Image (cartoon, rainbow, N blue to C red):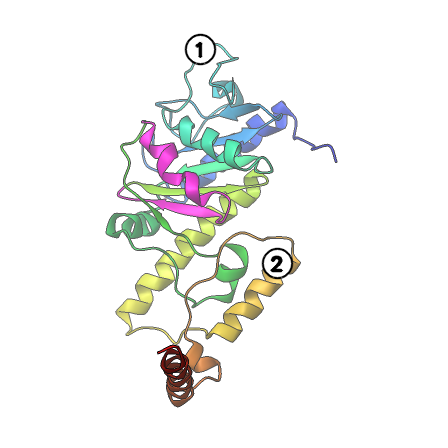
Amino acid sequence: MKKTFVSEIQVRKEICEYGQKLYDKGFVAANDGNISAKISEDIIIVTPTGVSKGGMKPDDLVKMRLSGEILSHGAKPSSEVKMHIEVYNKCHKLKAVVHAHPPMSTAFAVARKPLDRPILSEAIMTLGVVPVAEYAKPGTDEVPQSISGYVLDYNAVLLANHGLLTWGEDLQQAFFRMESAEHYSKILHNLELIGGAKELDCSEVNELVNIRESWGVTTGGAPPCDVNRSGITKSDEQTLVEEITKRVMQHLEKRW
């Protein structure tokens, strides 16, 4: 099936709109962050370097090939466009990438703590687990290398001591994943302030993952969960371990 792409005019307009949303929500400050979207299999529109995401105009944006060739005149692309290109090269169905520094998510990135606790049904279904990529110096080839292994299996990644990167099949999906990760981070933080959470058990997590997959979303992973609250008691586990140990020992005795 032939892929359909949004027109260049529309993509430029949408990037400016979502850039303004990032700025208004405080997900970026000054000239932070970058956004890109594909208009064909090998051409993207990306935000320029050194420009605030708030108040951008469509003509401010840069047109370039995934090979790195610049097709527009004037502004240069964001110095972090390499990680956008890595996302597109790893998964061809993805058409949009958003990078920003939302405060709470970035705090988790600095602490190098993944967003992986099973506390919110919506987070599991629409976002999934958000792992932490190893620290990489911004603007270098280390950055695309650090996120490369996460693109196919997840929908977002925390950049250690840096920020958050999300992707999607369109700009809205990529932005919503950014928004969802920040919301998830805030709730995790607030839970620590009030004494912790009652987490979902494995059967509940699996049900949510199944719903997500029924939507056609196979990425995101599943947060680690407690099987003991899914109907398996501690004594059941101990009995199982003892039985396995017994059979292994019997097998070894026969061999001796």
Quadrant where the image shows the N terminus: top right
Q: Which residue is mark 1?
A: 74
Stretch of the chain drawn in magenta: 140-161
Image point 48% across, 80% down: which residue? Answer: 230
Q: Which mark is residue 39?
A: none
Picture layout, residue 121 above or below residue 165: below
Give the side of residue 220 with respect to residue 3, left or right.
Answer: left
Q: Which residue is mark 2?
A: 213
* Observer able to see residue 188: yes
Kindly state the secondary structure of the residue where label 2 is placed: helix
* Observer able to see residue 23: no
Q: Identity of the amino acid at label 2?
A: Glu
| 90 part of magenta stretch | no
Picture layout, residue 240 above or below residue 109: below
- How many other residues sit within 10 Å of disc 2, few (<14), some (14-19) or many (≥20)? few
Residue found farthest to the top = 73
The spot of residue 159 in percent (x, y) is 33, 43
Residue found farthest to the front = 256
- Nearer-N-terminus badge (2/1): 1
The spot of residue 26 in percent (x, y) is 36, 43
Residues at marks 2 and 1 touching, judged by CB atoms closer than 8 Å: no
Kindly state the secondary structure of the residue where label 1 is placed: loop
> Which residue is nearer to you in this view: 79 or 3?
3
